[in-house]
Image (cartoon, rainbow, N blue to C red):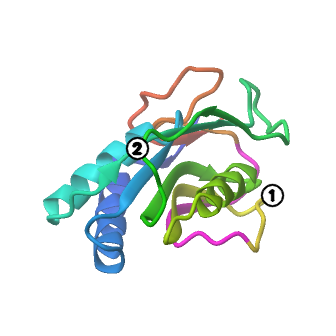
Amino acid sequence: MRTLFDEARIASRIDELARDIADDLPRDFLMAPVLTGAFIFAADLLRALHRLGVDPYVDFVQLSSYAGARASSGVVTLLKDFSIDVKDRTVLLVDDVLDTGRSLHFGRGMIEDRGATAVKSCVLIKKLTGHAEDLPCEYIGFEAAGDDFLIGYGMDDGGRHRGLPVIGAL
């Protein structure tokens, strides 16, 4: 594994993202992390928002397009739906990686179709290859060049390596 982003750099960038989000979104927005890859990023982002006096609602959605593989299957499946009604809310969809854009596109569309006032996206990593260029993503932690498979900080390889405190490339 090659380390792309260490713990200090990740923490600093999450604090910056939290400041941008706190400045832009209403205080009562709904933060919607996409399980499972975004759970660590979302937890740290939520704590950074709390330090700024922002206490959003939180609900999870689980989408899958990898099914344990290292490449997207091309089909997004809803595995866990929201528990909270998104109608008339500002929703921040939080995901780990923007790669092909399929999951983010699916999630945004689902939330918009359910009557959200606004949908914004926040990703930890935007890969500079393979993603849909026209897909809006308002908050981006890092950009990564190349087609490396990323692990750590919630991202896995067949269910392993999520707990790494860094973001690495295989």
Residue under pointer 1: 130
- Horizontal placement of 94 versus 54: left or right? right
Residue 32 lies, in percent from the top left, at 45, 50
Comparing 106 with 113, the one in front is 113
- Farthest residue to the right: give it: 74
Residue 150 occupies which quadrant of the picture? top right
Q: Amino acid at mark 2?
A: Asp
Which segment did they paint magenta?
135-148
Comparing 88 with 69, the one in front is 88
Residue 9 lies, in percent from the top left, at 36, 56
Comparing 50 with 131, the one in front is 50
Residue 6 lies, in percent from the top left, at 40, 47
Q: Residue at x 43, y 38 (%)?
A: 39
Q: Is residue 1 magenta?
A: no
Q: Residue at x 52, y 36 (%)?
A: 35
The image quadrant where one finds the C terminus is top right
Q: Earlier in the sequence, mark 2 or mark 1?
A: 2
Residue 139 versus residue 49 in the image, above or below:
below
Element type at mark 2:
loop
Residue 26 lies, in percent from the top left, at 31, 73
Q: Which numbered disc covers residue 59?
A: 2
Dot 2 alpha-carbon crowd within 10 angstroms: few under 14, some 14 to 19, many 20 or more: some
